[in-house]
């Protein structure tokens, strides 16, 4: 993470931070999927040397390869890199209580899927739009927790 300046604003992403997080993602993907550099390279259409160089922080991965990792291994796989751009959005509140937000979101989904709702058991366009802010807030809160877990785990 970049150190904040005297105003408490992050200096933003750095090449070193990007390479470090890409290396962490590669190690995690390989470990959790039982892949070698060759296996990962085959899955994302690059050479094992490219994987090795990125894992050892000698080079950066092309953003398209990161997107392929996200596509191949699931949503959230590259959040460590994406969080570099969203540092101002992540906050550092270790005690943020997501429970009320998630409970409200669950209630909104249950209400929208109720047979007596405007769309019956299918959510309508309007109901989804009404949930948008809660969904985005919940995603940010969950991403903060996932980023914290990944920093602790270092896979």
Image: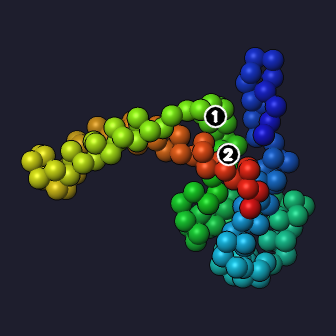
User: Marks 1 and 2: CB-CB under 8 Å?
Assistant: yes
In the foreground, 69 or 62: 69
Report the disc number at residue 148. 2
Decide which of tag 1 and tag 2 comes sooner along the chain. 1
Circle 2 — which element? helix
Q: Looking at the picture, how far across and down is residue 87, in whole percent? A: 67, 36
Give the class, few, some or many, for how many residues have Cα within 10 Å of label 1's Cα (few <14, many ≥20).
few
Marks 1 and 2, Cα distance to the nearest angstrom?
A: 9 Å
**Looking at the image, which residue sits at the far left?**
116
Circle 1 — which element? loop
Which residue occupies 59% across, 69% down? Answer: 73
Residue 83 occupies quadrant: top right
- The colour scheme of the drawn protein is rainbow
Report the disc number at residue 103. none
Q: Is residue 132 above or below residue 29?
A: above
Q: Which residue is mark 1?
A: 94
């Amino acid at each position: 993470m970049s150190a904040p300046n005297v105003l408490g604003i992050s200096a933003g992403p750095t090449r070193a931070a990007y390479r470090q997080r890409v290396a962490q993602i590669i190690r995690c993907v390989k470990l959790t999927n039982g892949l070698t550099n060759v296996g990962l390279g085959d899955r994302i259409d690059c050479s094992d040397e490219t994987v090795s160089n990125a894992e050892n922080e000698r080079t950066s991965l092309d953003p398209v390869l990161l997107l392929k990792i996200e596509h191949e291994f699931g949503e959230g796989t590259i959040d460590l890199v994406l969080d570099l751009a969203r540092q101002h959005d992540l906050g550092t509140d270790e005690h943020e209580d997501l429970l009320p937000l998630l409970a409200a979101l669950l209630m909104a989904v249950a209400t929208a899927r109720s047979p007596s709702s405007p769309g019956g058991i299918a959510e309508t366009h309007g109901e989804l739009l009404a949930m948008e802010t809660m969904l985005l807030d919940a995603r940010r809160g969950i991403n903060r927790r996932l980023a914290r877990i990944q920093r602790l785990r270092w896979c």
